[in-house]
Amino acid sequence: MKFEDLLMQPGEDKHTKFHLQQQVERLEGELEEELQLKRVLQCAVQGPVGCCESCSCLTPLLPFKVQMLLAELAVVEEEISWLESKVNEVKLDIYQEKQHIKEWELLQLKKGLQSQRSNGN
């Protein structure tokens, strides 16, 4: 005979089993909610490009305020990406302008040296 069998009375066996089944069902429900929340948050972080196909069906499950915040977040992320590309373009323009200025200064220096030589002869 098992140790558990010794501890349980015959009536307690059914009650304990029923109680455990209820706990399992409740925990499975909580797990499903947590997994669903995880999928939604992953989609929010990854954006539409890296998003899973099931996100569109998950969106209606979210509260309206959360849907609005996620939509605003997507717009802000797009704007940030656009601004970052513009910053990189401006940095490149500045670098190229500096290079042109250096080339112009060298050219002016060479012209000045040539004119000094021609005036000195």
Image: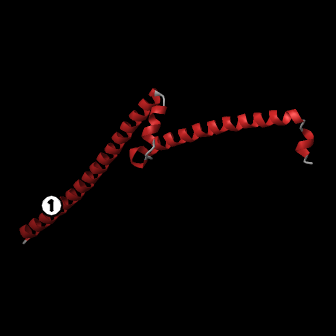
Amino acid tagged 1 = Gln
Disc 1 crowd rating (10 Å Cα; few below 14, some 14-19, many 20+) is few
Give the vertical position of 1 relative to 107 (above or below): above
Seen at 39% across and 44% down, the residue is 48
Q: Circle 1 sits on which residue?
A: 108
- Comparing 73 with 4, the one in front is 4
| Residue 63 position in % (x across, y down) | 48, 28
For the residue pair 113 and 7, the one nearer the viewer reads as: 7
Please give the name of the residue rendered at 49% of the width and 40% of the height, measured from the top-left corner: 40
Which of the 4 quarters of the picture holds residue 115?
bottom left
At x 73%, y 37%, the residue is 21
Is 1 positioned to the left or the right of 78 in the image? Answer: right
Percent x, y for residue 109? 17, 63
Across and down, in percent, residue 119 comes to 6, 67
Q: Is mark 1 on a helix, strand or loop?
A: helix
39 shown above or below 63: below
Is 75 situated left or right of 15 in this image? left
Query: What residue is at 54 percent from the left and 41 percent from the top?
Result: 38
Query: Splitting the image into 4 quarters, where does residue 59 fall?
Result: top left
Location of the C terminus by quadrant is bottom left
Q: Where is residue 31 in the image (x, y as percent from the top left)?
A: 62, 40
